[in-house]
Image: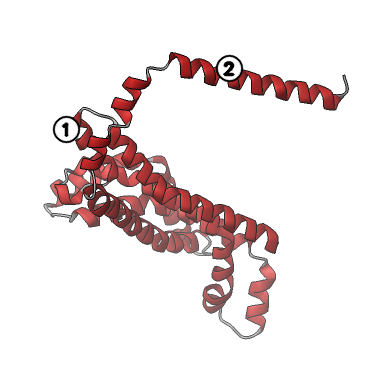
Amino acid sequence: MSPRQRARVIRGVQYGVLVVAVVVAALVADWGAIRSAFFDLEVARAQFPEIVTTALLNTVIYTALGFGFGLALGLVLALMRLSSVPPYRWLSIGFIEFFRGVPALLVFIALGFGVPTAFQVQINQYATVMLALGLVGAAYIAETIRAGIQAVPKGQMEAARSLGMSHPRAMVTIVIPQAFRIVLPPLTNELILLTKDSSLIYLLGLTASQYELAKFGRDALNQNRSLTPILIAGLLYLVITLPLGHLVRRLEARTAKAR
């Protein structure tokens, strides 16, 4: 056979194996048990509208707070990382390496229980989430922004300086805006990751009005002995992340076209 015929046969075999696997799964599965476990309409109706007005809204708020703080801190860390002053670079590298290496779970525990116990202070739930997500996110965002700044052609800075701009002004008005256009896709990916990490707030102990999607679904699972609430929570996470994923692809396409 020619290479094209051989490729066609291999592709046909792969499709055949896939069809056989789907048919076997459909015949073996207990559809009644699956329907009662995942698609219980009575349980599903009982989750609304609270899962949207409380859990989904809180998830969005927690993510927005964490990403906003992480973006601001990440920009500062990226500039420190590129600074000609050695102590700034050392501090930035130490922060980035520490929070990239430590699990977000431990950061939530430290801020939710360790810091209040050690310093005898009470931290608001929203502030705790903002700090925990922001500190972890800033470590990744800083490296993303740094790469974007270094990707801007050096001639942009040289041209700005030749026009009489100071280095800080040229960085703020010329370099950073171009860097953000370059790093928008990876920043959006970081936003998606923080959306999922917001579920770690359950460690802090929440009132019903502070539940996010994962906590709401888990409590409803315990109450109803059905996986339907977990399925609904997962679908609502997709309501947030799928548009962001589509945005990432659009931004990457536009960036590639511009280049």
Q: Answer with the quarter of the image where residue 66 lies.
A: bottom left
Residue with the mark numbered 1: 223
The percent position of residue 49, horizontal first and vertical second, equals 23, 50
The percent position of residue 98, horizontal first and vertical second, equals 39, 45
Number of disc labels:
2
Residue that sits furthest to the right in the current view: 2
Count neighbours of disc 1 (C-alpha within 10 A) and say few if under 14, some if 14 to 19, many if 20 or more. few
Q: In which quarter of the image is the N terminus?
A: top right
Residue that sits furthest to the left in the current view: 120
- Badge 1 vs badge 2, beta-carbon distance below 8 Å: no
Q: Quadrant of the C terminus?
A: bottom right
Instruction: Say which label, 1 or 2, has the lower sequence index.
Output: 2
Say above or below: 42 vs 61: above
Q: Answer with the quarter of the image where residue 10 lies.
A: top right
Q: Answer with the quarter of the image where residue 71 lies.
A: bottom left
Q: What element carries label 1?
A: helix
> Which residue type does callout 2 highlight?
Val
> Which residue type does callout 1 highlight?
Gln
Residue with the mark numbered 2: 20
Residue that sits furthest to the bottom in the current view: 164
Q: Residue at x 23, y 36 (%)?
A: 42
